[in-house]
Image: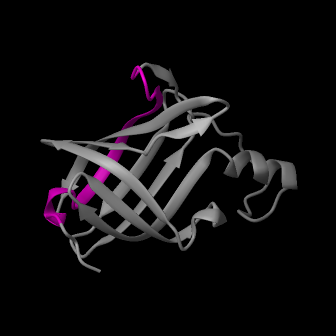
Amino acid sequence: MTIIGPASAVAGRWQLMEWRTVDDATGATLGHPFGEGASGGLVYTPAGWMHGQLSAQRRSLMTTSDPVGGSESERAAAYSGYVAYWGRYQIDHDRIVHHVESSLFPGWVGGTQIRYFTLVDDLLSLRTPPIEVAGEVLINELRWQRQESW
């Protein structure tokens, strides 16, 4: 896979500062899908690999220590507050294209996730293309702070 732009620009480990949804027309904040205190980590390697994870602000504990155990409703509640995927990535001008090889959400496996990005110093902003949800056109915006460079 060819990395069109300089992978060194985003290579490193990033910590989530904020995940919000914004109105595509006005830019107004509509909400925070996983709460204002959501957490997450993102890694881009210089060789073109990436992985990212997001966690809701508050997640209920399960009654078991077995990650595939517990009741179906417990697992559904626990895993619906979490997003994780990994794969290859490429930079194409103002876009980072994630080629998903595995994901907690099976529907993303084998597909691509496009993120428009801006990078200023050690602050990275990733924005999804506009999507329609319940009649509103919105964008997910994730802001990241660099924790480590490679």
Q: Residue at x 32, y 48 (%)?
A: 116
Q: Which residues are magenta?
A: 5-27
Colouring scheme applied when the structure was drawn: one colour
Which percent across, then down, holds residue 105? Answer: 63, 60
Which percent across, then down, holds residue 54? Answer: 50, 48
Is residue 41 toward the left or the right of residue 102 in the image?
left
**Nearer to me, 73 or 31:** 31
Q: Residue at x 74, y 63 (%)?
A: 66
**Nearer to me, 19 or 28:** 28
Residue 63 visible from this viewpoint = no
- Pick the quarter of the image with the N terminus: bottom left
Residue at the far bottom: name it.
Answer: 1
Q: Is residue 16 magenta?
A: yes
Quadrant in the picture for residue 107: bottom right
In the image, residue 117 sits, relative to residue 49, either above or below, namely above
Q: Is residue 15 magenta?
A: yes
Which percent across, then down, holds residue 129? Answer: 43, 45
